[in-house]
Amino acid sequence: MLDIEVIEDPAAAEASLDPIRTRILRELAEPGSATQLAAKVGLPRQKVNYHLKALERHGLVELVEERRKGNVTERVLQATAASYLISPVALASVAPDPHRFSDRFSAFWLLALAGRMVQEVGKLIAGAAAARQKLATFAIDGEITFRSAADRAAFAEELGVAVTRLVDKYHDGGGTPGPGGTPAGGGRKHRLVVALHPVLKTPIKPLSVKEQHND
């Protein structure tokens, strides 16, 4: 089972978005049969089997084992991943194209870059899993509070300079191209994306009648 699977097929994406099937996928983080699932999701076993067949047809669940119970063979299935993401490939005709934007201050370009990252890393994960190889990636996630918009702009400028300096230091231009136009050094290209955006505000929970009375 993968930690995260990226769904590219439009039909599989549609199947995964059905609320009942989403619930089934969540329950199948651990192997289970149609009978066991029926008790958990509150549906007849025949109805659960219908949804399981659709999920299995789109490669979202897989057979783990078959158990013989009297004259009946019980199929035990499991979700192919603990979590799922839908790739922009599933909406290929309307997916955002990073090449349409070139403004580093554009939120739309940031979204286009994020979409491309989901698409590319999803393919890389699938390829690495098929080859039974480890995928080399690196990420940093953190939060920073700026005193002012001027400080934020200054930070972004310094960050851009620092990243450019690192790229210039470690980028292997390859020198004279080798056969087929590939870099003579044979280095592997990596994509670098640096993003900065505001943190979502936490919704303020309204006080209950009892809490208001206590105040």
Image (cartoon, rainbow, N blue to C red):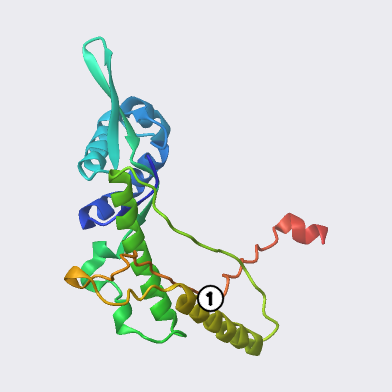
**Residue farthest toward the top in the current orientation of the protein:** 70
The answer to whether one can see residue 187 in this image is yes
Q: Looking at this view, is 21 or 126 the one in front?
A: 126
The answer to whether one can see residue 48 in this image is no
Q: Looking at this view, is 151 or 176 the one in front?
A: 176
At horizontal 29% and vertical 24% (from top left) the residue drawn is: 65
At horizontal 42% and vertical 33% (from top left) the residue drawn is: 30
Determine whether 200 is above or below 33 in the image. Answer: below
Which residue corresponds to mark 1? 196
| Percent of width and height locating residue 189 | 34, 67
| Percent of width and height locating residue 87 | 31, 61
Q: Looking at this view, is 116 or 19 the one in front?
A: 116
Residue 133 relative to residue 104: left or right: left
**Quadrant of the frame with the C terminus:** bottom right
**Residue farthest toward the right in the current orientation of the protein:** 215
| Percent of width and height locating residue 66 | 27, 21
Determine whether 122 is above or below 112 in the image. Answer: above
Residue 48 relative to residue 84: left or right: left
Three-letter code for the amino acid on which mark 1 is drawn: Leu
**Quadrant of the frame with the N terminus:** top left
Determine whether 99 is above or below 21 in the image. Answer: below
